[in-house]
Image (cartoon, rainbow, N blue to C red):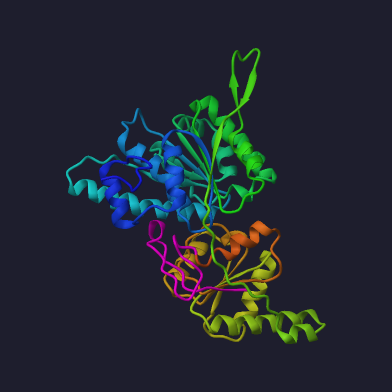
Amino acid sequence: MQIPDDPYAFHPLVTRWFHQRIGDPTPIQKTAWPRIANGDHVLLTAPTGSGKTLAAFLCALDRLIRESHDGDGPRILYISPLKALNNDVRQNLIRPLAQIRRLFEAEGVPFPDIRVATRSGDTPANERRKMLRQPPQILITTPESLHLLLSSHGGLSVLTGIRVVILDEIHAVVATKRGSLLMSAVDRLVPLCGEFQRIALSATVKPIKVVADFVSGYRLEGDPSDPVYVQRPIRLCQSAETAGDRIAIRMPKAVTMKSGDVDLWNDLADHLRQSIAACRSTLVFTNSRRLCEKLTYLINAGRQTPIAYAHHGSLSRQLRLDVEQRLKRGELKAIIATASLELGIDIGTLDQVILVQSPPSVSSTIQRIGRSGHGVGSIAGPHSSPRTPLMGSLPRPWPRRY
């Protein structure tokens, strides 16, 4: 049995898992799999919730399941700009790997030991040491942490077997110093590992050709004493799908009539408190940590039990994870967040996303709005019929977006 339209002949048991747990492939998966399986460098762009992550990972996982390892060490390197996104991706990989393992064991087929680990500023020292002693086959990290690994003997020793590099949310760094940091680190891997496959993912990226050239980079050909650098070819995989949104711009009437700063924010907090109370789950985005903490305090003021919790990069890893998981389980009414929850983190069902002030860019606006209606196949509408989403996230109901 193979995936419909035969975009790639996965291991039969991987194919069976896909059909049982996911269903039919999305258009972007059908487009991307043959090119990824062919070893092409790929820039994959599609709306939020269209299955990009699985499109990038499944071929690499299938190859990892089939191949015999010559020693330990990462074969798949996943890099994203956010530590919180890395933790989420790790959990969303462990779950399907366990499901596939059980399927293999039920059929009496050997399944390799595939370990997944994260390496970021949140990673405890004991886990970092364990990673060096027992390197994972899939390593999830950030641009900064990859540079640190490349600057140590221990890190260099485990980064010699990379075969696939997945660059997620590439739009978030491509025009910044972090983008230069990222691609310089990726190119430093080439002398260690040889040439490897590059797969970049984004829901919002323009101009696409410029970003594609940025991702592919240049390959050294000929004698190093007389170097010639040639642009690596890269394939563009674009989805024709569009995501439906319902957007409204609202301002409390009291805000327009007040001139004092304190009154303005109190009025806004009252408006947000009412909006949060009317829904099961709400995600509110702010543009700064200071405003995030301020609104959280004002919304919860005078309440014995908080209804909103703050989420930003200055909070501890455990506190951020706890807030994410509690909202996902339906135990929280709202999170007030900075860009720490902007990218593709799975935080479960959302009724509405509220943007306080204008985000810093159009792409940031699209990403924040996309936190609602994020499941594969979810359509923002009163009669949506979402399919089973990637790796266990929940389909979103009709979202209210402000």
> Does the stretch in magenta take in 379?
yes
Which residue is situated farthest in the right direction here? 259
In front of the other: 394 or 18: 18
Q: Is residue 72 left or right of residue 314?
A: left
Q: Is residue 16 left or right of residue 283?
A: left
Q: Quadrant of residue 116?
A: top left
For the C terminus, which image quadrant? bottom right
On the image, the x and y values in percent for residue 84 come to 52, 56
On the image, the x and y values in percent for residue 53 come to 46, 50
Classified by dominant secondary structure, the portion drawn in magenta counts as: loop
Q: Which span is picked out in magenta?
A: 374-402
On the image, the x and y values in percent for residue 108 come to 17, 43
> Does the stretch in magenta take in 17?
no
Residue name at image x 51 percent, y 77 percent: 333
Q: Is residue 136 left or right of residue 99?
A: right
Residue name at image x 50 percent, y 25 percent: 194
The answer to whether 327 is drawn above or below residue 41 in the figure is below
For the N terminus, which image quadrant? top left
The answer to whether 390 is drawn above or below residue 157 in the figure is below
Asked if residue 204 shows in the view, the reply is yes
The answer to whether 330 is drawn above or below residue 102 in the figure is below
In front of the other: 55 or 391: 55
On the image, the x and y values in percent for residue 65 come to 32, 39
